[in-house]
Image: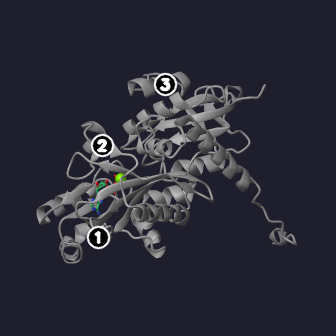
Amino acid sequence: MTTKIKIGVLFGGRSAEHEVSLVSAASVIHALDKNKYDILPIGITKDGRWLSEVNAIQLLRDHAPLETLPEHVLLPDPRKQSLINVSTAFPQAAQHIDVIFPVIHGTFGEDGTIQGLFELADIPYVGAGVLGSAVGMDKIVAKQLLERANIPVTKSIWFFFSEYQQNSKRYVADIEKKLRYPCFVKPPNQGSSVGISKAHNRKELLAAIELAGQYDRKILVEKAVTKPREIEVSVLGNNEPVVSLPGEIIPSNEFYDYDAKYVDGKSTAVIPAKLPKNIVKKIQQYAAEAFKVLDCAGMARIDFLVQKDGKIFLNEINTIPGFTSISMYPKLWEASGIKYPELLDRLIQLAIDRHDQKKQLKTFYTPKTDWYKKP
Ligand SMILES: Nc1ncnc2c1ncn2[C@@H]1O[C@H](COP(=O)(O)OP(=O)(O)O)[C@@H](O)[C@H]1O
Ligand SMILES: [Mg+2]
């Protein structure tokens, strides 16, 4: 009898995308092969409490935790690799975990913070590491790295919100001169279009910057691509990533905002996207290159904007993409020949492979002399 792999599926979290994460995680839990995996659901409330098992399932189902509950934490102790019940704190109450599947979008889940905890705990986890998650999350830093790798991105300006508050006229003049209207104003570390606006004039620009400033200390303003086609590809792998067929999103609103993504149900997806072969090839090349440049691992969904004249812009990279059964990431793999449960198997194996490879690296150095013992 082979023993099953214990998978900790993590969801919820202190993020504007908390609800999206619950829906994604329910899908992942449903699709994981129960013959291969023992599933430990781990939910994180909006205020950051960790819950496990029945309490976690309660959060998943009812979107609200129980009033009284034992809290759990993952210890940053590589000898334990366990989730501890804080209320009892008896080591025997600890639950060993083989692999963590973080299905948390946005802040504290997709941005490298929680990946740091997994590294400290020395547990394999699905998806990008600390660096890839952090740079993938920050649209400003990601753009700078992509530009250096000659991957085309939209023209943009960024500044600290605090700088803007001191001298708004200067930044508005700069935006109007270099980018013009319409432009997109974004808090660089969000997702699901939260805090993003399309500004058509100065009045809208001012309101858009104030809104974005509620979500981030930095503001990104981009030149708008006119009537872009929104093309997405899925990437899978570690050092040799493979790229899926492209899909196209046809948003129901003027742009693909939160409501168009989740609420009104009117946006549609065309899989595979109808595009000339040379454009598909270029997009796939840019995606594989971006995955490497941004130090991604396991998975990413990479989104492009394609202008009428065929010009391609890499818009953003999502290191923990939506995972519902109708989400683009698994759908694109399905269209490319990998079914959802098999995709999960592959992602878990990639997490184990990456952890094994890292394990072989030295984390110590033996000095030739005991120089450090000298006074
Ligand atoms: N420069 C741009 N030109 C045209 N449309 C854009 C631009 N930037 C963003 N958008 C629109 O806004 C949506 C959300 O922006 P995006 O950068 O993908 O943020 P998020 O990470 O929240 O998904 C995109 O899917 C697209 O519809
Ligand atoms: Mg997006």
Respond yes or no on whether mark 1 lies under 8 Å from ligand 1. no
Number of dots carrying numbers: 3
Q: Position of residue 134 (x, y in %)?
A: 49, 58
Residue type (three-letter) at the residue carrying disc 1? Glu
**Compared to 140, does 255 lie above or below?**
above
Q: Which image quadrant for residue 24?
A: top left
**Which mark sits nearer the N-terminus, 3 or 2?**
3
Q: Which image quadrant for residue 37?
A: top right
Residue situated furthest right in the rendering = 369
Q: Secondary structure at mark 1?
A: helix
Quarter of the figure with the N terminus: top right
Residue 50 visible, this angle: no
Q: Which residue is mark 3?
A: 57
Q: Which residue is mark 1?
A: 163
Is there CB contact under 8 Å for labels 3 and 2? no
The residue shown at (18%, 76%) is 173
Q: Position of residue 56 (x, y in %)?
A: 50, 27
Q: CA distance from mark 3 to mark 2?
A: 30 Å
Q: Which residue is mark 2?
A: 268
Looking at the picture, tell me which residue is in the foreground, 147 or 134. 147
Looking at the picture, tell me which residue is in the foreground, 373 or 364. 364
Q: CA distance from mark 3 to mark 1?
A: 44 Å
The residue shown at (86%, 69%) is 370
Residue type (three-letter) at the residue carrying disc 2? Thr
Quarter of the figure with the C terminus: bottom right
Respond yes or no on whether mark 2 lies under 8 Å from ligand 1. no
Q: Is residue 202 left or right of residue 245?
A: left
Q: CA distance from mark 1 to mark 2?
A: 40 Å
**Which mark sits nearer the N-terminus, 3 or 1?**
3
**Compared to 80, does 304 lie above or below?**
below
Residue type (three-letter) at the residue carrying disc 3? Ile
